[in-house]
């Protein structure tokens, strides 16, 4: 493939750059340097898309070095990407670039540290999406917490400390079980390795061990996604985070949870995943409905977007775990298109949610910069003062509802379609989001954008400046582009998802599945 | 002469100690820096002696009529002890000057404590081990009491002395019973004797001896339920002494535990492992929970030390090569982290002012972003969050525990490390999220700044390349047959 280690570049360039920004400090244009680095990282990630052989769907651009070789542990620095990773890496580099642009004026204190934290986080998240070794994955997965913790705690809102520590402890508590599970799995491999394909190939796990390993995965990744009822850190963290922090949480950090289900949980313990699929499907459905209802009653715009974001992530886990309900059918029809559709839908939903939630948080952040509040009641009729903003906000709201033509539609539609094949009621409950989502989104839009202007502060609002316009316009293009023409994305991922299906659906499981379906 | 070859670094250190003691008599307060430099120079020379003469050997070498022994593990541990002592003395120079305690005794007593530690690492005879331990302890009692006119320091010293003496008594009593059973004081012979005993698990006198030995060692390590002295001593002691006390001696006690339990009493492993597992798990639990309530940083680190010792013991008690190496890796990293944390407190102090309470760190990142970052790395490392080195220490121990099929213990350990993360986060919260009250500048020389920075950066470098130190521990213990 390519001669030079492009994946390592994508990890280490932002991290080293971030450290450089930190050392140089504020004096010599931390903003410009950080933006330049983020732009380079984004440009570097583009060749991945074009050079990746999507039809093969295998791991490509692989890099392997021996990393730890002591105490009987053999861990390699093993990187590689498939179509799904590439989509998420692109999302990550793209959103980081936008967030750094958006924070140009809004961050005034300790600019160098802020920029450095985002760059380091970008590198670590890229590492999560590239790691092919479970320990390496864990290191990146946990390491991400440090910059996020600082971003939330240093630049957040008034109740940031409670929110930040809660967030950290939740995620850390979730992931320590993951660590024990990974070590346990490692002791079960014949050659003592953390290499993911070796873990996929494990067949000697007892039923109990599988179940415990799966549950630990569920807790670790469920906190990240977040899955109901592990979501309680989220509304606080989202609403207290600075704009950039909320965007990164919503657009990137939660995707790591979804991706981890795809890369670790389901392929490593497919039998247990199959047995517990109903639980995850139900939790996802609860998230979709209950979080939508909660969003309906929020008076704080950021919290509203936060709850709606949990509801939308419900589609991701729903899509993944539907696979097991569909495999039974697949066995009967001898074609797996239904399950491919579900996973495709979940993946598109991840990318689309990155754009939509990111855009909404950025838009809310722009309001916050002007008025220093995100209470819905403080706003009314801002259309007359900020027509451009209102137009964009309307578009993002529609994407959040899942209007056809926006990216929000594609993913949810795929998942609902797939769930209809699995079970009528699953599809029915999932589809209520279309009504509930419309209700809370449109109601919020009505209260914020329309009506009489009745406060002098709203009257003094200025419309978007050029930088803000550019950011929102790029996101709007992305959302519409993905909505009208999702094929580049689906083509990128399809081969990889097929490969993945081969691992997740062990053949000896099929008769059992047939019986239960 | 050739017989003494084996103890060359120790003999040199003893000679240097006498020279420094005499030298200091002729120096006034202004020129006392010469004492300091002479001390550091002798420590550096001792490192070179350890490195050149007793390193890279494939097996154990026993000498001095079977009383003294060197192997790879001893070499690595001695160098670690000496390096950390150099850091401790460099920090002590600033602290002693700031606090008006600039006296030569610190360095002389410190050197004799180091001599005791080196003997503990290499002793292969119950009495030699005990003498090393006592040399260390007696020097430490005096160091803790260095601030004579301070009631808290005196209380700490008396507590430390009384409890330490009781612990030494326990240990000595246990050792005498071992001698009574096996008829020998040499670790080799004791091991051989017990290997040939048929029903070791029901040997009542041996159980008696083991109980006393484990209790004595637990006192010295400060693990629950023999931990009561630790927080008070840490708090009452001058910070420079706390730094020294909390880092290098832990390595020496690790060596003592390995020599006694994993080498001499290895055949009786089934008898002592249950006792130690219980103590270790209790320490991990109680240490972490009690640390939550502390506002005094030194007390907080004392409780955190208790839990770290529990982690380390879990590695030893697995009694596998992986477990021993993991424990060694853990103790080396812990000594670095603990030394780094106290060095940070010293660095931030100045004339007539000590950093001791949590709120003294308020807004540190706004005042001194670089050192706040270094402290952050140390704290995340103590909490065991990757990509810092502390994670791999926890990882290695947990790996050993899971391999030995103690998965439930591993789960308990990680749950407790979540509890532990909370109080480290509290410190970070104060440093990063709170606004500073005042803006005191840092008054420190370049040497301590560099050492503290190097210590912090090492946490991240060893986090990115953990294989280096792990490999050293691994190979050293392979060569030492452990």
Image: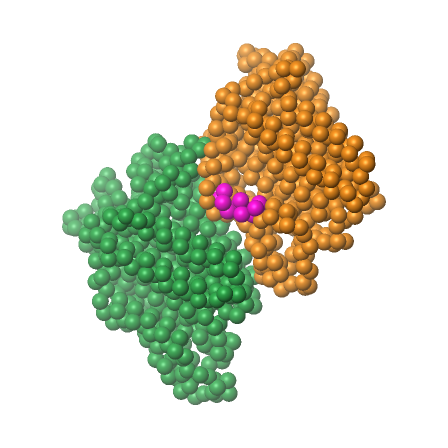
Color theme of the render: by chain
- Residue under the image location 37 percent in, 84 percent down: A387
Shown colour of chain A:
green
- Residue under the image location 30 percent in, 46 percent down: A62
* Foreground pick, B357 / A68: A68
Which residue, as the protein is rendered here, is positioned at the far right? B149
Eyeballing the image, is A86 above or below B176?
A: below
* Foreground pick, B160 / A30: A30
- Residue under the image location 44 percent in, 63 percent down: A34
* Foreground pick, B454 / A418: B454
Is A84 in the magenta? no
Does residue A148 appear in the picture of this structure? no
Q: Position of residue A261 (x, y in %)?
A: 35, 50
Q: Position of residue A8 (x, y in %)?
A: 36, 50
Q: Position of residue A493 (x, y in %)?
A: 25, 55
- Type of secondary structure dominating the magenta stretch: helix
Chain letter, orange in picture: B
Eyeballing the image, is A87 above or below A358?
A: above
* Foreground pick, A147 / B62: B62
Figure label count:
0
Give the quadrant of residue B138: top right
Magenta span of residues? B454-463
Give the quadrant of residue A450: bottom left
- Residue under the image location 56 percent in, 26 percent down: B52
Is B459 in the magenta? yes
Q: Position of residue A10 (x, y in %)?
A: 36, 54
Does residue A378 appear in the picture of this structure? yes
């Amino acid at each position: 493939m390519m001669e030079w280690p492009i994946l390592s570049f994508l990890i280490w360039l932002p991290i080293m750059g971030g450290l450089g920004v930190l050392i140089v400090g504020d004096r010599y244009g931390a903003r410009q340097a950080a933006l330049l680095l983020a732009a380079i990282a984004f440009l570097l990630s583009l060749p991945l898309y074009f050079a990746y052989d999507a039809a093969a769907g295998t791991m490509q651009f692989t890099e392997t070095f021996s990393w730890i070789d002591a105490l009987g542990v053999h861990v390699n620095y093993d990187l590689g990407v498939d179509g799904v990773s590439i989509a998420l890496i692109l999302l990550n580099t793209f959103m980081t670039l936008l967030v750094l642009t958006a924070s140009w004026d809004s961050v005034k204190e300790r600019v160098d540290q802020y920029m450095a934290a985002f760059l380091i986080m970008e590198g670590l998240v890229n590492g999560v999406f590239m790691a092919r070794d479970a320990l390496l994955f864990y290191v990146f997965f946990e390491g991400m917490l440090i910059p996020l913790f600082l971003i939330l705690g240093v630049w957040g809102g008034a109740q940031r400390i409670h929110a930040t520590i809660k967030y950290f402890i939740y995620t850390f508590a979730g992931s320590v079980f993951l660590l024990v599970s990974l070590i346990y799995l490692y002791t079960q491999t014949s050659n003592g390795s953390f290499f993911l394909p070796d873990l996929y190939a494990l067949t000697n796990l007892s039923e109990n061990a599988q179940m415990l390993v799966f549950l630990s995965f569920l807790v670790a990744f469920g906190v990240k996604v977040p899955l109901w009822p592990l979501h309680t850190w989220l509304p606080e963290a989202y609403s207290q985070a600075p704009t950039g922090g909320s965007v990164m949480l919503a657009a990137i950090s939660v995707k790591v949870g979804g991706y981890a289900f795809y890369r670790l949980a389901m392929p490593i313990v497919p039998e247990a995943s199959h047995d517990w699929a109903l639980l995850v499907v139900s939790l996802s459905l609860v998230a979709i409905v209950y979080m939508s209802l909660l969003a309906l009653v929020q008076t704080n715009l950021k919290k509203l977007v936060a709850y709606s974001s949990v509801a939308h992530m419900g589609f991701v886990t729903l899509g993944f775990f539907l696979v097991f309900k569909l495999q039974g059918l697949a066995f009967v029809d001898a074609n797996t298109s239904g399950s491919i559709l579900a996973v495709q839908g979940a993946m598109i939903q991840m990318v689309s949610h990155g754009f939509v939630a990111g855009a909404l948080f950025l838009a809310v952040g722009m309001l916050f910069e002007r008025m220093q509040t995100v209470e819905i009641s403080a706003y009314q009729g801002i259309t007359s003062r900020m027509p451009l903003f209102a137009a964009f906000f309307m578009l993002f709201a529609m994407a959040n509802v899942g209007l056809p033509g926006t990216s929000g539609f594609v993913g949810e539609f795929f998942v609902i379609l797939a769930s209809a094949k699995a079970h009528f009621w699953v599809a029915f409950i999932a589809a209520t989001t279309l009504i509930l989502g419309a209700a809370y989104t449109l109601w919020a839009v009505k209260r914020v954008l329309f009506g009489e202007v009745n406060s002098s502060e709203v009257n003094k609002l200025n419309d978007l400046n050029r930088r803000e316009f550019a950011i929102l316009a790029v996101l709007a293009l992305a959302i519409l582009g993905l909505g009208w023409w999702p094929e580049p994305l689906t083509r990128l991922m399809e081969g990889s998802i097929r490969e993945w299906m081969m691992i997740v659906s062990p053949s000896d499981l099929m008769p059992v599945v047939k019986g239960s379906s | 002469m050739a017989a003494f070859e084996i103890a060359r670094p120790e003999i040199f250190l003893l000679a240097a100690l006498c020279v420094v003691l005499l030298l200091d008599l002729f120096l006034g307060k202004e020129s006392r820096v010469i004492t300091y430099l002479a001390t550091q120079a002798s420590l550096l020379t001792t490192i070179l002696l350890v490195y050149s003469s007793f390193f890279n050997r494939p097996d154990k070498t026993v000498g001095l009529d079977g009383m003294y022994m060197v192997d790879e593990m001893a070499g690595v541990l001695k160098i670690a002890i000496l390096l950390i002592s150099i850091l401790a003395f460099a920090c002590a120079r600033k602290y002693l000057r700031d606090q008006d305690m600039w006296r030569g005794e610190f360095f002389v007593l410190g050197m004799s404590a180091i001599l005791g530690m080196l003997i503990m690492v290499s002793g292969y005879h119950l009495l030699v081990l005990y003498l090393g331990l006592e040399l260390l302890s007696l020097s430490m009692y005096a160091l803790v009491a260095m601030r004579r006119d301070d009631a808290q320091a005196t209380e700490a010293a008396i507590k430390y002395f009384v409890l330490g003496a009781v612990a030494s008594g326990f240990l000595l009593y246990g050792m005498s019973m071992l001698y009574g059973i096996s008829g020998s004081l040499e670790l080799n012979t004791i091991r051989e004797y017990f290997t040939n005993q048929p029903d070791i698990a029901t040997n009542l006198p041996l159980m008696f001896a083991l109980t006393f030995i484990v209790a004595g060692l637990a006192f010295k390590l400060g693990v629950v339920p023999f931990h009561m002295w630790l927080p008070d001593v840490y708090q009452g002691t001058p910070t420079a002494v706390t730094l020294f006390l909390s880092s290098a001696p832990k390595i020496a006690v690790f060596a003592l535990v390995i020599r006694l339990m994993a080498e001499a009493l290895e055949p009786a492993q089934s008898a002592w492992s249950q006792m130690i597992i219980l103590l270790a798990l209790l320490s991990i639990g109680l240490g972490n929970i009690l640390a939550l309530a502390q506002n005094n940083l030194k007390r907080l680190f004392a409780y955190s030390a208790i839990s770290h010792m529990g982690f380390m013991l879990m590695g030893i008690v697995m009694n596998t090569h992986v477990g021993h190496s993991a424990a060694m890796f853990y103790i080396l990293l812990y000594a670095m982290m603990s030394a780094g944390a106290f060095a940070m407190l010293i660095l931030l102090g100045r004339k007539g002012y000590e950093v001791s309470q949590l709120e003294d760190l308020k807004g540190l990142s706004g005042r001194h972003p670089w050192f706040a970052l270094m402290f952050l790395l140390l704290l995340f490392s103590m909490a065991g969050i990757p990509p810092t080195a502390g994670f791999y220490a926890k990882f290695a121990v947990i790996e050993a525990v899971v391999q030995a099929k103690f998965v439930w213990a591993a789960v308990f350990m990680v749950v407790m490390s979540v509890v532990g993360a909370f109080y480290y986060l509290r410190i970070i919260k104060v440093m990063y999220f709170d606004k500073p009250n005042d803006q005191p500048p840092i008054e420190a020389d370049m040497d301590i700044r560099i050492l503290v920075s190097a210590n912090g950066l090492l946490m991240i470098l060893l986090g990115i390349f953990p294989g280096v130190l792990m490999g050293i521990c691994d190979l050293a213990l392979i060569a030492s047959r452990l």
